[in-house]
Amino acid sequence: MSYYVTTPIYYSNGEPHLGHAYSTMAADILARHMRQRGEDVFMLTGTDEHGEPIALAAEAEGVSPQELVDRNAPKFEDLVERVDSTHDFFIRTTDKGHVERVQELVTRVRDNGYVYQGTYEGWYCPRCADFKNESEIGPGDTCPIHEIPLLREKEENWFFRLSAFQEKLEKLYEDEPGRIMPDFRRNEALSFIRGGLRDVSLSRSQLSWGVPLPWDPDQVMYVWFDALSNYYTALGYAREGEDLSERYWPASWHILAKDILKFHAVYWPAFLMAAGLEPPQRMFIHGYLLMGEKKMSKSLGNVLDPFEVIEKFGADALRFYCFREVSFGQDGSISTEGFEKRYESELANDFGNLASRSLAMVDRYRDGLVPETDADPLLLADFDGINERVSALLDEAQIGQALEEIWVLVRRLNRYVEESQPWVLAKDEGDAARLDQVLNGLTEGLRVLSLLLHPYLPNSTATLLAALGEPELSLREFASRSGGQKVERIEPLFPKL
Ligand code: ME8
């Protein structure tokens, strides 16, 4: 099965922050998990480099927009690499390959009769690059997201016939509720659509930083159509000489936060349908990472520097923390204290310590050889079906719940050590068979858990899997190995700070 997962493309108008890393880490967890299941995976992330958000920032800094994005895009690329994202391509909307393909796409939409000339008048947020409906305006004509005054705009431009898709979109989300997750976000999208869809500007005449319209090069394409199209255009040029669109389109999942729901759930499927293409299969709308009560954002200036966090705790700890602390789909506060607490109690103690002591016991009591024996029926029952449960949750992009399922068993193995007391069994030759079974159970449990945790903790589980003599990443059941393999002691996976 082909599996295509995307993240938003981030505005390269400033420094990347943890909010950006969050969506990319989420997509990467899904991508890694699906690869472990043997699926044909493609993951995309990248930067959005056109439109007012970029043009205004460049103006403020006294550099050209191209200079600005050339300076900033590598920082975003660096960030996603530092969080150990395994994306297959990093798209920049200034790529020649994207520009050519987005021009083709918009031409198709026009050829199909969904474009006309008109005058736009209304409220506009230059940071969101969004024409706001009456229902989307904050107190005193401000942008509720950026808390800045909206601009009153009037301009001649080309329009996209969004209104033609009202019924199709309603039907899409009524008939197939799983297309927008969580469900309350689907309701939000539906109520926006039911409120009546007005045609939207497809181009801007007062802006020059963007993709020129092929039939009217004085106008540039409205940045949202340019940006959304990345999910499709990337497949056309990510691999030189290969067109991957047949193989991966429609996308399996778009991952994004609630700020850009309207564009993804309403504009994008309509635009695709207008071009004669299929809408994405599903999208997952996550919440905001908050600092205190406020959304972490560049414009509000309250960002937690992921580079610093990674420096201190490592990428695994950051990935783990974000999906353990904040329920995926909801807003949630994060903090340095929170990091340290979870690092200490869950990563260092629950998991790291379990791994070190289990391996040390196999080393000490059995010279590092996993005893060959029947599986402990107690553990067999606890681990029964875990791969299926985690897979089913991740099929629904339930990243936090899947992690909780796995962690229940991490805790279970800790209790198992306490209950079975291998150090006591080791004192009595009469308990040798029982000790064999316990040590076998611990290494089997660790092996299964490491495989399941691999998408979340790619580095520490790689170390642990190597120490467990487990060369493969594919998911396999508890007791699928009967023992006999050599294991090694390890240094603490998450050293105490
Ligand atoms: O909107 N918590 O770019 P953007 C969680 N270029 N996620 C956050 C976050 C936070 N505090 N802050 C940012 C744009 N994000 C457009 C997108 S897509 C075709 C074009 C993440 O730089 C989250 O995924 O403002 C959010 O949707 C995205 O960054 C917005 O990034």
Image (spheres, helix red, strand yellow):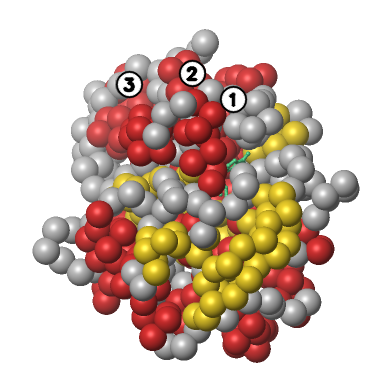
Query: Which disc number belongs to residue 308?
Result: 2
Q: Considering only vertical position in the picture, is 164 above or below 290?
A: below
Tell me if label 3 and label 1 are in contact, CB under 8 Å.
Answer: no
Rounded to the nearest angstrom, the CA distance separating label 1 from label 2 is: 8 Å
Secondary structure at numbered mark 2: helix
Q: Is residue 327 left or right of residue 447?
A: right
Mark 2 crowd level (few <14, some 14–19, many ≥20, 10 Å Cα): few
- Pointer 1 and pointer 2: residues touching (CB < 8 Å)? yes
Locate residue 476: give its quadrant: bottom left
Image position of 280 with respect to 422: above or below: below
Q: Amino acid at mark 3?
A: Ile
Label 1: few (<14), some (14–19) or many (≥20) C-alpha neighbours in 10 Å:
some
Nearer the camera: disc 3 or disc 1:
1
Q: Is residue 146 left or right of residue 382?
A: right
Type of amino acid at the residue the image marks with label 1: Leu
Amino acid identity at mark 2: Glu
- Residue 302: quadrant of the picture: top right
Against 375, is 244 above or below? Answer: below
Q: Which residue is mark 3?
A: 490
- Image quadrant in which the N terminus is located: bottom left
* Gap between marks 3 and 1 measured at Cα: 32 Å
Quarter of the figure with residue 470? top left
If you read the primary sequence from the N terminus, does the residue marked by circle 3 or circle 1 appear first? 1
Q: Is residue 472 visible?
A: yes
Residue 155 rendering spot, x and y as whole percentages:
61, 63
Mark 1 vs ligand 1: CB below 8 Å: no
Instruction: Return the mark for residue 304.
Output: 1
